[in-house]
Image (cartoon, rainbow, N blue to C red):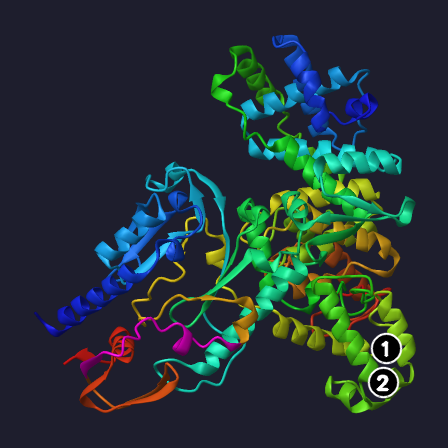
Amino acid sequence: MDASNKNFEFLKQKFHEHYSSVSPEGIAPSDCASREFGAGWDKKIDWRHLALASAFELKSFLVREAPLYVSYSAAHYEAPAAQPMERKNAKAWDLIFDIDAPTLKVEHQHNELFCAKCFEAVRSDTQRLIDFLVGDFGFNEKEIAVNFSGSKGMHVHVTSEEALRLTQDARKQIAAYIKGPKDAAALLMQYDEKAPLRGPNATTSGWKRRAFNAAKEFLEKATVEDLMDYGLRRDRAQRIVAERSVALARLAEGVWDAVAGLEKAWPTLVGGVIARSRVEIDEPVTTDAARLIRLPESLHGGSSLRAARIDLKRLGEFDPLKQAVAFKSGKMIKIKTQRPLEFDFDDETRCVEEGESEIHEGVALFLLCKGKAELA
Amino acid sequence: MRDELIAKYPFLSAAKKFIDAGESEVSYEELETAARSVTSLLSNPAASLTVYSTPAKAARSHALARLLLATLNNRFVTRRYANARAGQAVRELAGENDDDFLEIARDLLPSVEARGRGESALFVVSVFDFLRAGGGLLGANLEKGVVALDRDALSALIEEAVSSRISDFAEAKPKRLPAVVREAAEELRRGIPANALPSMQAAFRGSHLSLPCVQALLRGVPEGKRYYGAMTIAVACAKDGLGRDAAGEVMRQYVDSNERGSSPFTLREGIAVLDWVYKHGGEINFSCRTMREHGFDDGGRLCANCAKRQAFKQQMQHQGKQFGPNQPQRKFGRGFRH
């Protein structure tokens, strides 16, 4: 048995042990019998079009086959095992979002195993996404479920009755809304630079409100220097500051160029609000009706971590390297590595020497799944 | 719902009881009459609503027209008809009192509620109804799952919803229809004049709408440029003195010409641009330079054959001035530049 086969069999054995200990209800999705399942060993999906009629049958499958990756359909089908896709006959779809990378550029920690900075940004993006879902779309927090992806991202599932009936066009619109307008021009109306500049007023909401609030806050506090930073001449900036109350009153009516020169500042300012407020979701996950997504609480073959469900109230504290660790038996496993590694894992900083060493099972499985170690 | 409303708006849900209570057999003559109403509306989408003497007649005529269109199975013709029918209905709706307007709105958008009455009334509708009706989210006043709209915006949404309801043939099974219906549909197909659709373009030929670049826009533009395209068309309509209703027809043609893609440009978005331009019509001039900046000149090819540009060039030469892209720009009114 070569090294890669030995590692693979070891992982399968450990995954089998893990799935033997989980409760069927703890891992089965809602409406299990209507879902299509997918499973993978070499890659994320080697097998799909699987139908499993109950939580018990799902658990039996996981224990027997010990897949390294498990996924399930957003769609609820009449015939989940049917092929081709049209014959499955979808009845409804969960509304799902995937954030697999930070929206804004982050200075990495250069840890090849797991970048805590990137994950912190993804967690913050997830909170902003939830704010959209609740504040803009009116979903109840009880209808929103979040889980760690198992690798470096987050998944958000909306399970309300209304969400289940959304058409594909509606999902595209929702995804586009969360990703935000392409630029300020989508929120400000002007034919060319000589035409009047009109935009959101005090009564608007949604993205227009975000733009309006940013403009209002800026106008309320801007100094001459702040305005000059946007490319205005000093005399123009001074005039705007002097006529601030006029500009604010007209802004509330939707007139964004009441004082000459202001129109220079808006595209950059509004563009900045859009950039900071939007969330870069993986759009096909939300809009593709045939998509399979990681089963919450299943194990991820690329990390050995659980796709752990997260309490919304504790989202800000969630650390996957503590709370998504599945293997905590305390057993020691012998591994060998090509070079030394240092990383945080399960509440400790781990230092693994180059060559052979004996380490805790959870750490070993993490390194084996990441491809950074082999069994000794 | 009052019978008078159903007679005017037979797409309303309450019309179904008249269909169910009516004759199940349909004659060729009835289908011919329905076919004529379809071709008539396609030829003149700005026509006023036909009001039938009874709701039963209105419901039956409407149902037969839809039956023929479903059998015809031509998506473009169906959408043209549905859009025209929806446009008629919304123009008529403008004259309805607040209570009737709201009752009709609720038939299409069950969650709609009014806040206030008269011209300044605001309406709120659930985001789900808004999306189902084809509303555009990015510019919507959305908060806590509810979209706020004024009467004009709600009318535009109703128009989308009516058009979708008329053109949705999900329940139709054309292959199971009687032969008389299939024959009548075939007659309808032959009866749609070859120039029936282009004739709508001919009706909207003003000096700006007939510009080669604007005609090119009406045939559709790539995603990312549709908003600016809509703005240009709206300005062209306003400058050519088109009435708001006729301009709406032009905008519908523009929306229909754009493939849906991943970010569809909806009729609602187009109408919103149109309404904004018509509100500020006197302040905005058509700008050839803006057209070039947005790439609507097909790399200069369309300008090369443009009569407007040729006329301006001759005028400049007559005045002894040089003409070219790097020469000082002379303004003729606000925003008018070559």
Percent x, y of residue A50: 30, 46
Kindly identify which chain the residue marked by label 2 belongs to: A
Give yes or no for contact between labels 1 and 2 (Cβ–Cβ under 8 Å). Answer: yes
Residue drawn 62% across the image and 8% down it = B27
Q: Label 2 sits on what residue type? A: Arg
> In terms of image quadrants, where is residue B2?
top right
Which mark is drawn over residue B301?
none
The one nearer the camera, B100 or A317, is A317
Which numbered marker is on residue A236?
2
Indicate the secondary structure of the residue bearing disc 2.
helix
**In this picture, residue B138 sits left or right of residue B99:** left
Subunit of label 1: A
In the image, residue A259 sits, relative to residue A188, either above or below, namely: below
Mark closest to the chain's N terminus, 1 or 2: 2
Distance from disc 1 to disc 2, alpha carbons, whole Å, reads: 7 Å
Is residue A115 one of those drawn in magenta? no
Q: Secondary structure at mark 1?
A: loop
Residue B36 can be seen, yes or no: no
Q: Which residue lies under the disc numbered 1?
A: A260
Tell me which residue sits at (26%, 75%) in the image: A365
Q: Which residues are magenta?
A: A317-335
x 28%, y 64%: residue: A18
Q: Looking at the image, is A283 positioned above or below residue B105?
A: below
* Residue lying at 64% horizontally and 58% vertically, measured from the top left: B296
Is B54 positioned to the left or the right of A108 in the image? Answer: right
| Mark 2 surroundings: few (<14), some (14-19) or many (≥20) residues within 10 A | some
Instruction: Note whether A110 is above or below A278 in the view shown.
Output: below
Percent position (x, y) of residue B52? 80, 18
Q: Quadrant of the N terminus of chain B?
A: top right
